[in-house]
Image: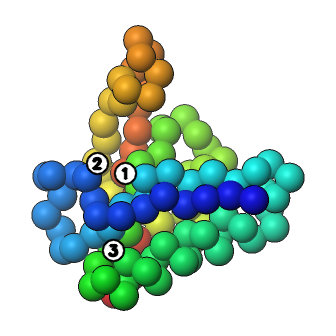
Amino acid sequence: MGFCYFGPTRDAEDHAGRPAEIYALNVAPQHWRHGAGRALCEHAARDAQARECDAMILWVLEGNRAARRFYEALGYAADGAERVNVKLMPGTPLGEVRYRKAIA
């Protein structure tokens, strides 16, 4: 149905507390809008909190309005950090925005 890949933050410059990071979230389209993505993100946050993390972060494509609305509905907010990802699609720079949610 889907997966949520998460762990310690990979952002070396993020010194605000002890954040964990959602690296990837994917839910099969036939399961969209049925709570699977929310359940996966909530599981990740509970696990990170149990490991004494105080926030969850994630990076989302700047132009992916649907994903941004989804994360905002879960309580995440853009924290002002931005980057250009050239690894996702080599030769095509993609703007990303970092989102953060307190979990402690």
**Disc number for residue 39:** none
Q: Residues within 10 Å of mark 1 (few under 14, many from 20)?
A: some
Is the C-beta separation of discs 3 and 1 under 8 Å? Answer: no
Foreground: 4 or 18? Answer: 4
Q: Which residue is mark 2?
A: 81
Residue sitting at x 36%, y 23%: 86
Q: Amino acid at mark 1?
A: Arg
Q: Which residue is mark 1?
A: 98
Residue 22 visible in image: yes
Residue sitting at x 72%, y 67%: 36
Specify how the rendered protein is coloured. Answer: rainbow
Q: Is 90 on the left-hand or right-hand side of 53? A: right
Is the C-beta separation of discs 2 and 1 under 8 Å? Answer: yes
In the orientation shown, which residue stands out farthest toward the top? 91
- Label 2 vs label 3: CA separation? 15 Å
Q: Amino acid at mark 2?
A: Ala
Quarter holding the N terminus?
bottom right
